[in-house]
Amino acid sequence: MIKECLVIRIRELKLNTNIWAMLSMVSILFITLPNLNILSNVFNEPNENWLHIKEFLLKEYVINTLIIVIFTGFFTVVIGTSLAWIISIYDFPLRSFLKWGLILPLAIPPYIAAYTYTGLINYTGLIQSTLRNKFNISVNQSYTDIMSIEGSIFIFTMFLFPYVYTITRAFIAKQSASLIETARVLGRSPLAIFWFVILPLSRAAIIGGTSLVILEVINDYGVVQYFGVTTFSTAIFKAWFSLSDVDTAIKLAGILMVIVFGILLLEKILRGGKKYSYTTTKVRPITRIKLSGLKSALAFGYSAIIFGLGFLIPSFQLIHWAIITYNKVFDAAFLQLMLNSLLTASVASALIITIALIIANYSRISHSIISKIIARLTVMGYSIPGAVIAIGVIVFFIAIDNNLFWLYKWVKEDSVKLVLSTSVFMLIFAYVIRFIGIGFNSVESGFEKVGKKFFEASRTLGMSVTQTFFKVDVGMIAPAILTGFILAFVDIMKELPLTLILRPFNFETLATKAYQYAVDELIQEASIPSLIIISISFISVYLFHRVADREEN
Amino acid sequence: MYVEIVGLNFRYRKSHDKIIKNFSLEISSGEIISVIGESGSGKSTILRLIAGLEIPESGIIKVKNRIMVDETTFINPEKRGIGMVFQDYALFPHKTVEGNIRFGLNALSSQKQKIRVEEVLHLVNLTAYKKRYPYELSGGQQQRVALARALAAKPALLLMDEPFSNLDRELQNKIRDELKILIKQTNTTTIFVTHDREDAKALADRIIILNKGEVVKTGEAKVALA
């Protein structure tokens, strides 16, 4: 029996060892090496900087990060689930517009929202100057100080709650029409149903959405740095840029990575093994309750206020600034940085989709455990904060440059030592690690939808795995490939922490330029690059929404 | 013997129970064999093993004296020259009827491909539907395209997995008779799997009854099903 098993495993291994397996393994090696590098260097001999940080600052980083994570988590759950419930079960004016509009805050990256709100409510901003000039009211400045921990929590909540909202709403729509009706027939009020039926049932969905929010918060650098709040991300930046201390940066990054793994583990435990999978049978839509009078006004008012704060107000403010500044901002240099953004994002997304296709195809065909592990590792990068990946990639590339110096000199006698680690190649490499998960998920679900029968049919008709891939698979999952490309592209366009650390000298993208303007107190000038980023993000939000909606119907 | 299967055993990963236990079968050229059994009896797995879509734990499969699989050999499905009609046909939705049939004729020149497509389309009586896409065809027409696609490359052996399960009763009887004439006309050695005794009786020269991965009865249609 054991011998038989072994013979079969060896045979499977032989049959599975093909170009797809090789390429997958090489890809995953490059994807994971920089991160493993960090973990292996965490226990290096500590230096003075580290001892200083550990003694005086580490506690603050941990506490600040935790406060922001916990409060943002709490508020996004409250807002996200309550909106999901209201939109799912009640009918009130503009409901169908708000159902989709409430996803839109996701199109505004939190760092853009941060300086937009700052510009909006500071002393010279629209609100205070209107109050002062028109009504002669001056506001106590301590009430309007958004550049604080509380301000960060506000920004993260308003612009990340759609993660909880969309996942929970989709869950309610798919799972519970009959449950809600049963509970109603049993004489429970809608509020009681929400508390005792929907909330416990949607636990996994809510936790899934919240953990996405938390990972985004931990990943953020732009908001907290702009607001002057010290967190792990800002500390890693400081260690690298101000102290030029890689070892300390690695130690901080290592701790942050452990925290992230802790959160992922917690998510698993809280979900209790339940994935928010949907029943496959066709689901009846919920019959909504029509609200009138005060109740209707309340439901509309609440949703509209959140929509206003999370999308409408900052968008109008940005458009207003854009009208004032466009002729100052648009010039040849601006075109150049737009080109930079488009080119790096296109190249990185194309690489992401290529690698995602290779690994997804391999893990689909092979039944081996290795292929399953590779698939899981591929999506890991998306949970790891940008600053951590950045430090891992830097260390990795400097090591490569050190080892390839002989080659550089052989090619060009007076070559400098750092070639790859000062090039845009390093940035693109990091983008691939960070965002391959998005491309992979898209491609993988495309393969899942199509199933294996066409692949098998093609094999019996005389086509090899590779021929089948090009002649059948690519054509059949083309929509998934396109979606994956666009989602990765948009995320790269918005990306800030990785880009700030890894970009070559004088290399600006839309995101870094917008951020630079804001840091230089030129908030109004930041509006044009910001609006471009928001318009592009809009596409991804739209795609996401359309796919979700189609699945719902 | 044209097809020789000796001592075939198979189990899925992580599963303790064998799906196929010591399965042996010999088929002469041009014969039509029907494997019948309840769902879960392992009948589809036998087809998948012969096609090369699954790897057996042990056993030998030979077709036309060529070893497809034994202890040391495993020929990939695309190299076996065995045609298969899948239960739900698996017609490529992004290719026309013609594109589907041409798909398996890669080895031929473009000219010869065209001639062969016309031949098999004529055989299954679908010449007028050449440019249609699968979704524009009825269930019976789709089934004929799948058959034409499998026959186009003149396979050494034709496998059919529940070929009638997606058709309504009336159509089923009609197509069954057509199919028998077609297979005999082309003298294609065929194994088809079904749960329906009527199908087996009408089509097969010989019947294998399978239960929990084991052959429980074998013989001429009338005898085995008596």
Image: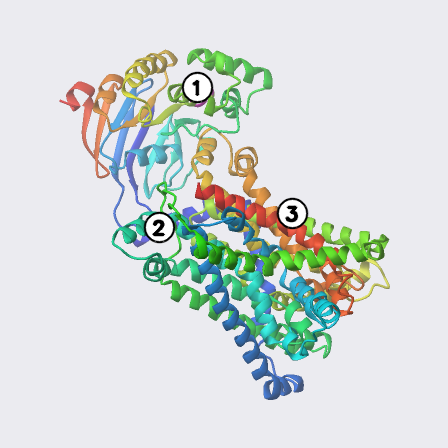
Label 2: how many Cα within 10 Å (few below 14, some 14–19, many 20+): some
The part of the chain drawn in magenta is B148-152
Q: Is residue A266 left or right of residue A188?
A: right
- Chain of the residue that carries numbered disc 2 in the rendered image: A
Counting from the top left corner in percent of width and height, residue B38 is at: 22, 34
Task: Answer whether residue A36 is visible to the viewer in this image.
Answer: no
Q: Secondary structure at mark 3?
A: helix
Counting from the top left corner in percent of width and height, residue B5 is at: 30, 32
Counting from the top left corner in percent of width and height, residue A455 is at: 47, 36
Residue carrying label 3? A350
- For marks 3 and 2, give the one nearer the viewer: 2
Which amino acid lies under the numbered mark 3 shown in the image of this protein?
A: Ala
| Closest to the observer, B62 or A491 | A491
Residue carrying label 1? B148
Which amino acid lies under the numbered mark 2 shown in the image of this protein?
A: Ser
Q: Please identify the quarter of the rendering in which residue A398 is found.
A: bottom right
Examine the structure image and report whether residue A106 is included in the region drawn in magenta.
Answer: no
- The residue lying furthest to the left in this view is B226
Residue carrying label 2? A176
Q: Please identify the quarter of the rendering in which residue A242 is found.
A: bottom right
- The residue lying furthest to the front in this view is A135
Which quadrant holds the C terminus of chain A? top left
Which amino acid lies under the numbered mark 1 shown in the image of this protein?
A: Ala
